[in-house]
Amino acid sequence: MRKIKRILTLIFDYLFPSDILNKAHKFAKFDDSQFALKIDGIEDFAIPFNYRDEIKDCILAYKYRDKPHYAEFFSRTIAGATANKFRDVKIDAVVSVPTILDDKQDFDHAGYLARKVATNILVPYIKHAMIKTRKTEKQHFLDYQQRLENVKDLYAANVKKQHKINGNILLIDDIITTGATVASAAEALRAAGANKVYVAATAYTNLKNYREVKL
């Protein structure tokens, strides 16, 4: 039923185009000079927006309200931020933070976005490069320390797919808050053979109290 609803939504939005591009000028641009998050094992971040107001509404619509076509806009903005921030870096592959426990579950929003980012920057996308090893609590319900514990050792290389993970990897997530999720995923990528891990996301949620993330 959910898949049918998504198909009908895509058809409707094709016939009656979304106003996401009309809203884009209102999106809060991310100020890289104010970004203080440092994470062991992650070289740097590329993030186009701050997670608030109109961009927050659009990200939530993409994830939870059957707006997968929003990924077209998000992927182009992430690709632009990546090209600008990592202009001197050769990215060898794009992977996503696993958002579902197995391949049979519903919409993998990070994976869908990562595939489109990879297309935009002309780099291979490794589908299902990692897996989640267990069920977890939703991160947005947890405080800082609980977030770290919730995702510690959560991800692992997907040995069933026999992907070769090496070189410089661009890791895609939707939102960066504490960085705990991407830190755990980056750790798994490095253990699987990645040389360096770079992170790109749609938006960043600023924390009042900055802490350095070490897992």
Image: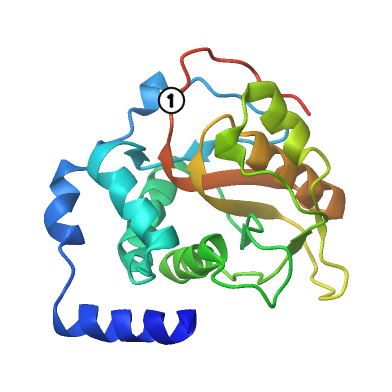
Q: Nearer the viewer, residue 198 or 174?
A: 174
Residue 177 x, y percent position in the rendering: 52, 33
Vertical side of 136 occupied by 70: above or below: below
Q: Which residue is mark 1?
A: 206
Q: Is residue 138 left or right of residue 10?
A: right
**How would you rate the neighbour count of disc 1 (Cα within 10 Å): few for under 14, some for 14-19, many for 20 or more?**
some
Q: Is residue 63 left or right of residue 61?
A: right
Residue 146 x, y percent position in the rendering: 71, 28
- Which residue is located at x 51 percent, y 63 percent? 109
Vertical side of 21 occupied by 6: above or below: below
**Scheme by which the image is coloured:** rainbow
Q: Nearer the viewer, residue 74 or 138?
A: 138
- Which residue is located at x 76 percent, y 53 percent? 135
Question: Toward which corner of the image does residue 133 lie, by quadrant?
Answer: bottom right
Q: Is residue 87 visible?
A: no
| Amino acid, disc 1 | Asn
- Which residue is located at x 38 percent, y 61 percent? 62
> From this viewpoint, which residue is outermost toward the top?
209
Vertical side of 36 occupied by 181: above or below: below
Which quarter shows the C terminus? top right
